[in-house]
Every structure is written in structure tokens, then in C-alpha cells.
């Protein structure tokens, strides 16, 4: 339940955020800090959205610790607050054992790997069920299984091709895949044996599934990611800019992230950047929630219709 927005043009920049946070998808608290400013020497603001913590450590805490580390140091560009020896390096290496403990990475990998395996199982299971639904009364079971094997192999090959073409996140390469293959190969086989029924996979597919699991572990981002927004001015910037980090755990002792940016320049004079839930952003921009607007419109239309009838009656009486 998040609504955040950045509005900037050649004359300045404004950041706005709600204070609601949802815990475990149910309980909503309205006292969370999602918008942070630094010292007077730093014309930089930060916002967070998505997951509210990294390895159970709240982003609010991490950002305040980073702010203390930064002290009054300022940089030439907004980008430098995100790269070099600063926020990302702080996430990768600091003195806080609660954040740096290897068990955090192990738990993240285990959770992500299990999610990927179960998702692949669902895809193949749905494919198998669809074939039986379509051909169950017309074909023998063996024929349907042959069709399934053909479709499943094509699906796995296409998935491998897509992953091969997909770029690695910043700081990762094939060496990271090799390390994970060595570390997790047996674990993937155990998950396949425990999650898949025998009719849903062939033993000869194990190599392909391992490749998919390891590559997707590095290249795909989960739904539990965190968004970190850096916005404002560097010391040598006359126009504002926004840099966004999408952070999703750690692998091989490296923070898994990708980034994007928006800048004001001579060709782009103004930008509005909403974050998180679209309905909340629309409410912010329109000044009214969509459902409330629809309700008011419905009531007004009914009232106008009845008013027309009343006016006609009064006109006839007169």
C-alpha cells in the first residue's frame, strides 16, 4: 500500500510519499518513514517502496546508518550517491553482522530457488492438464504424453534461449553461474525429485532445468524486491535527476540490483514519476480515489435524471 511520486522540471524537484506500510499482506501501519533527507549540504532526497527491509533489517534503519556514514560529504552528481564508494558498497560491505551474515544470502537463495522450482512445476503441470483436457477423449494416454514431452521440451528450450539472451544484473557474469552450479546443483535435483511427479519430467531434462534455475536466480527479480529512489542535485548539477535502484537480495556476496534514471535537460523539461500502486498514484494526481469518483458520478447522474423529471413536472404545472 504505497503511493510515491517525484515531480521535477528545470526549476526544481519535489518528492512526496505516504506513510502506510503493509505487514505480511494484512496489517497496515500508517507511521512508516519512506522519505528521507540528508544534511543541508546535500540537496538529495531518498524514498523507498516495495519490500520495506533487506534481510529483515528495515530500509529506514539502513538509510539512517548510511546517512551517518555519509556525514556532510557531498558529491558532484546524484549518480555518485548510488555508485562508487557509497550506498551500494555500503550494502555490500559494512560492519553490521545482522546484514552481512552469510545465512541471509543462503535463506534468500533457498527461498528464490524454491519459488522458481514451484513456478516451473506449475507451468509444466498446467501444460499437461491442458493437453488432457483438449485431447483426453480423443487420444490414448501415451499419445498425449508424447505431445506433452514435445511441448515441454520446446518450452524449456525457449526458456533457456530467453535466459541466454537476457543481460546479467550489474556486477554479475557467467562466473557467478558457475559458482552457483557447483554450490546448488545437487539441491536443484533434490527439489525436482521432491516437487515433480514422474510423468512431468524426464531425467534427461535435469541439466536444462538446472540451467534455468541458476540463470533465473541471477537474472530474474522476485516480487519481493525493494525500490530505492535517489533524487535531487549533485554539487555540479544545475538540473535535477532521479536514479532508482531495484534491489533483490544478495548472491555470491554481491547485492543483486538493476538501475534506471530520469534526468532533466535541455530536451526534457519536466518529468512526473509515480512509484508503486497505480491506483494510489492516480488518486494523488487526480485528487480523488477512482472508486469515490465513480460513486459520486453515479449519484450525480441519478440526481440529474430525477431533477429533469421534476423540472418537467413543474413546467407542465405552470
Image (cartoon, rainbow, N blue to C red):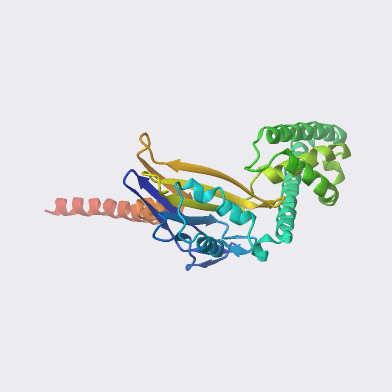
Side of 42 relative to 192 (left or right)? left
Would you place residue 32 above or below residue 275 in this image?
below
Side of 131 relative to 18 (left or right)? right
Residue 146 figure quarter: top right
Q: Is residue 313 visible?
A: yes
Q: Position of residue 37 (x, y in %)?
A: 43, 60
Residue in the foreground of this view, choosing between 53 and 147: 53
Q: Position of residue 74 (x, y in %)?
A: 45, 54
Residue 52 figure quarter: bottom right
The residue shown at (65%, 43%) is 171
The residue shown at (15%, 51%) is 315
Residue in the foreground of this view, choosing between 297 and 235: 235
The furthest residue to the left: 318
Would you place residue 238 above or below residue 292 in this image?
above
* Total labels drawn: 0
Would you place residue 196 above or below residue 103 in this image?
above
The residue shown at (55%, 54%) is 87
Q: Position of residue 191 (x, y in %)?
A: 82, 50
Q: Is residue 188 visible?
A: no
Q: Position of residue 133 (x, y in %)?
A: 75, 39
Amino acid at each position: 500500500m504505497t503511493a510515491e511520486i517525484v515531480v521535477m522540471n528545470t526549476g526544481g524537484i519535489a518528492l512526496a510519499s505516504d506513510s502506510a506500510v503493509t505487514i505480511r499482506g494484512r496489517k497496515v501501519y500508517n507511521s512508516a518513514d519512506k522519505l528521507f533527507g540528508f544534511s543541508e549540504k546535500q540537496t538529495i532526497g531518498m524514498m523507498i517502496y516495495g519490500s520495506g527491509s533487506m534481510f529483515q533489517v528495515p530500509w529506514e534503519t539502513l538509510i539512517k546508518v548510511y546517512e551517518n556514514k555519509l556525514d556532510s560529504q557531498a558529491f558532484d552528481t546524484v549518480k555518485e550517491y548510488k555508485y562508487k564508494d557509497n550506498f551500494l558498497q555500503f550494502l555490500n560491505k559494512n560492519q553490521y553482522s545482522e546484514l552481512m551474515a552469510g545465512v541471509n544470502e543462503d535463506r534468500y537463495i533457498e527461498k528464490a530457488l524454491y519459488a522458481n522450482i514451484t513456478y516451473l512445476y506449475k507451468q509444466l503441470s498446467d501444460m499437461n492438464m491442458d493437453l488432457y483436457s483438449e485431447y483426453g477423449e480423443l487420444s490414448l494416454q501415451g499419445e498425449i504424453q508424447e505431445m506433452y514431452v514435445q511441448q515441454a521440451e520446446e518450452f524449456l528450450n525457449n526458456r533457456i534461449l530467453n535466459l541466454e539472451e537476457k543481460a546479467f544484473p550489474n556486477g554479475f557474469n557467467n562466473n557467478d553461474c558457475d559458482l552457483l552450479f557447483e554450490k546448488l546443483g545437487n539441491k536443484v535435483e533434490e527439489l525436482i525429485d521432491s516437487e515433480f511427479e514422474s510423468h512431468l519430467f524426464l531425467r534427461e531434462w535435469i541439466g536444462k532445468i538446472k540451467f534455468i534455475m541458476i540463470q533465473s536466480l541471477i537474472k530474474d527479480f522476485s516480487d519481493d524486491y525493494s525500490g530505492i529512489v535517489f533524487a535531487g542535485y549533485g554539487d555540479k548539477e544545475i538540473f535535477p535527476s532521479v536514479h532508482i535502484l531495484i534491489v533483490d537480495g544478495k548472491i555470491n556476496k554481491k547485492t543483486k540490483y538493476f538501475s534506471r534514471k530520469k534526468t532533466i535537460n535541455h530536451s526534457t523539461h519536466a518529468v512526473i514519476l509515480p512509484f508503486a500502486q497505480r491506483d494510489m498514484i492516480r488518486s494523488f494526481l487526480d485528487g480523488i480515489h477512482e472508486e469515490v469518483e465513480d460513486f459520486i458520478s453515479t449519484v450525480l447522474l441519478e440526481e440529474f435524471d430525477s431533477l429533469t423529471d421534476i423540472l418537467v413536472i413543474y413546467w407542465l404545472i405552470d
